[in-house]
Image (cartoon, rainbow, N blue to C red):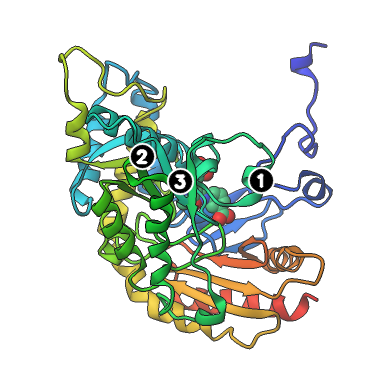
C-alpha cells in the first residue's frame, strides 16, 4: 500500500504542530470546534458553545453569514486566482474602493496582505521606504510599546512588547525602542471606558526620541487599544499626545487596528472612536469576517504620492504577496462590508456598549477578580494570579467555561471577551453568568 492510501485515524492529533498552543497538554485533552452558526460554535459531539470572542477577535458579523458564504462560493467557481503583480482583477479594485470610502482622516490607499502580521511588516516597510523616497534615508528606527502585539513576523515581534514572543528567538530588528505600557491598576482599576490617569506616559516618547535623535526615527507603532496582552484601554489624552509628538518630529504614526478595526469599538476604526488619525493603519481579521484570510494596510495619499516618482515603468514598491488581493478574500470582504452596512453593526456595537459595560463591571467582587476594563464590545477581566503559578488560574477558567459552553480567551491571568457584534443582550447576560460560575468553581 502506498503511503497516500494508508488509512488515517481522524482521532490522531499528532501530525499537527499547533500554533500558540501547549501541544502536549492540548493533545491529551483536546477541545475541538467543528461547526459554527451565528453566535455559536458546535463541538464534534454537537455541544453548543457561545462565542464570547468572535473566534479570535475576528468574526465580527457572526458565523456562517449566508451572503458571505455565497460570495465566496460564486467567486471560487468564477475565478480561483489571478496574479496581482503587473496584473489585476476587478474585485480587488472594487474592494479597495469600498474600503477607501470608509477610511477616516487622510487615509486613502489600500495595500492588501493576508494577515495582521503581514500588514504590520508591510506598514513598517512602507514607513522606511517613504522616508527614503523623500531623502530621509536615515529614518530607520521604530518605536513600539511594552506589551504591544503586532503579530509574529520579525518586524512585528521587534516592535512588539510581549516578552515570550521575542525571547525564544533572540534575533530581532535592530534600532527599535519601546514606550512604557499604560497598565496602571493602582490608579485605574475598574475604569469604565478610558482611564483617567496615564496621558503623561506618552511624554516618555519625547525622552526616547531625545536618546536616539528624532530625525532617525521612521515611525511609532501602537495598538489604539492593546488587545492580545489583555485589553489595555488608552488613558484619556494619551493617543492625542503621541500624535502631537510624532507631528512635531516628522515621524509617522501607525495604528495597528487588527483587532479594533471593523466595528469592535462601535465605530469603523478606533481612529474615529478616539478622533486621532494615524498616517498608516494595519487591519486584518474583521476585514473579511475571517471567512477568508486577509489583511490590509491603509496609507495616506501623501505617503502613496511620495512613492509615485521616477519613470512610469519602474515598480514603485518592491513588496507584495502572491495572495495580495486574492479573489476569494476580496469577494468575502465586499460581502462582509455589505453585512456591516446593511445591518448597521458598528452602530449596534456602540448602542450595546453601555449594557456590555454595566454587565461586565457587575462581575466586580466575583471571586479572583482584581480589575475589569472595557470599551465598545471588548472587556478584560483580570484575575489574581495563583502564587508561583501565573496563568494557570485563567487557563482553568478557560477550560471550565468551554466545558460549560462558553468560549473565552485568556492571556496570562486576564480573561478577554469580544463577542460578535450581533450579540443579543440575553447572550451578554449568559456570558457574564457562565464566567462568574466558572470563577466561583475554579480554585
Ligand atoms: N496586530 C494585532 C494588534 C493583533 O491583535 C496581529 C497584529 C497579527 O495578526 P495575524 O493575522 O497575523 O495573527 C494581531 C493578532 C489573542 C490573539 O488571543 C490575538 C491575535 C491573534 C491571535 C490571538 O488575543 N491578534
Residue 376 seen in this snapshot: no
For the C terminus, the quadrant is bottom right
Q: From the viewer's perspective, is residue 5 above or below residue 423?
A: above
Packing grade of label 3 (10 A; few <14, some 14-19, many >=20) is: many
Q: Mark 2 to mark 1: distance in Å?
A: 35 Å
- For disc 1, the marked residue is 20
- For disc 2, the marked residue is 216
For the N terminus, the quadrant is top right
- Compared across the picture, whether 383 is left or right of 342 comes to right
Q: Mark 3 to mark 1: distance in Å?
A: 18 Å
Q: Nearer the N terminus, badge 2 or badge 1?
A: 1
Mark 1, ligand 1, within 8 Å: the answer is yes
Camera-side residue: 335 or 381? 381
Residue 420 seen in this snapshot: yes
Q: Which mark is residue 290?
A: 3
Mark 2, ligand 1, within 8 Å: the answer is no
Mark 3, ligand 1, within 8 Å: the answer is no
Amino acid at each position: 500500500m502506498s503511503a497516500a492510501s494508508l488509512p488515517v485515524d481522524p482521532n490522531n492529533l499528532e501530525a499537527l504542530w499547533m500554533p500558540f498552543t501547549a501541544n502536549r497538554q492540548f493533545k491529551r485533552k483536546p477541545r475541538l470546534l467543528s461547526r459554527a452558526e451565528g453566535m455559536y460554535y458546535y463541538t464534534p459531539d454537537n455541544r453548543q458553545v457561545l462565542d464570547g470572542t468572535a473566534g479570535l477577535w475576528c468574526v465580527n458579523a457572526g458565523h456562517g453569514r449566508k451572503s458571505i458564504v455565497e460570495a465566496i462560493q460564486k467567486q471560487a467557481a468564477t475565478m480561483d486566482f489571478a496574479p496581482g503583480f503587473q496584473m489585476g482583477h476587478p474585485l480587488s479594485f472594487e474592494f479597495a474602493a469600498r474600503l477607501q470610502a470608509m477610511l477616516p482622516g487622510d487615509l486613502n490607499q489600500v495595500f492588501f496582505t493576508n494577515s495582521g502580521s503581514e500588514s504590520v511588516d508591510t506598514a513598517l516597510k512602507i514607513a522606511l521606504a517613504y522616508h527614503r523616497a523623500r531623502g530621509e534615508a536615515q529614518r530607520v528606527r521604530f518605536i513600539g510599546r511594552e506589551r504591544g502585539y503586532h503579530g509574529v513576523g520579525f518586524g512585528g515581534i521587534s516592535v512588539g512588547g510581549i516578552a515570550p514572543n521575542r525571547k525564544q528567538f533572540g534575533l530581532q530588528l535592530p534600532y527599535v525602542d519601546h514606550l512604557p505600557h499604560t497598565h496602571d491598576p493602582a490608579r485605574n482599576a475598574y475604569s469604565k471606558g478610558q482611564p483617567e490617569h496615564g496621558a503623561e506616559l506618552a511624554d516618555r516618547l519625547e525622552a526616547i526620541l531625545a536618546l536616539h535623535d528624532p530625525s532617525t526615527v521612521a515611525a511609532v507603532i501602537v495598538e489604539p487599544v492593546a488587545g492580545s496582552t489583555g485589553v489595555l484601554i488608552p488613558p484619556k489624552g494619551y493617543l492625542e499626545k503621541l500624535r502631537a509628538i510624532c507631528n512635531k518630529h516628522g515621524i509617522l504614526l501607525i495604528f495597528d487596528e487588527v483587532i479594533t478595526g471593523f466595528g469592535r469599538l462601535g465605530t469603523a476604526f478606533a481612529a474615529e472612536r478616539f478622533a486621532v488619525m494615524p498616517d498608516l493603519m494595519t487591519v486584518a481579521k474583521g476585514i473579511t469576517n475571517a471567512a477568508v484570510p486577509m489583511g490590509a494596510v491603509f496609507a495616506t495619499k501623501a505617503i502613496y504620492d511620495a512613492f509615485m516618482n521616477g519613470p512610469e515603468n519602474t515598480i514603485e514598491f518592491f513588496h507584495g504577496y502572491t495572495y495580495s488581493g486574492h479573489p476569494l478574500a476580496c469577494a468575502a470582504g465586499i460581502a462582509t462590508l455589505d453585512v456591516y452596512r446593511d445591518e448597521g453593526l458598528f452602530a449596534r456595537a456602540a448602542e450595546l456598549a453601555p449594557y456590555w459595560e454595566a454587565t461586565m463591571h457587575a462581575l466586580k467582587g466575583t471571586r479572583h477578580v482584581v480589575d475589569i476594563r472595557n470599551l465598545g464590545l471588548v472587556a478584560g477581566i483580570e484575575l489574581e494570579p495563583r502564587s508561583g503559578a501565573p496563568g494557570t488560574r485563567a487557563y482553568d477558567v478557560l477550560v471550565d467555561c468551554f466545558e460549560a459552553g462558553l468560549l473565552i480567551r485568556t492571556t496570562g491571568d486576564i480573561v478577554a471577551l469580544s463577542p460578535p457584534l450581533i450579540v443579543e443582550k440575553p447572550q451578554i447576560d449568559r456570558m457574564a453568568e457562565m464566567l462568574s460560575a466558572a470563577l466561583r468553581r475554579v480554585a
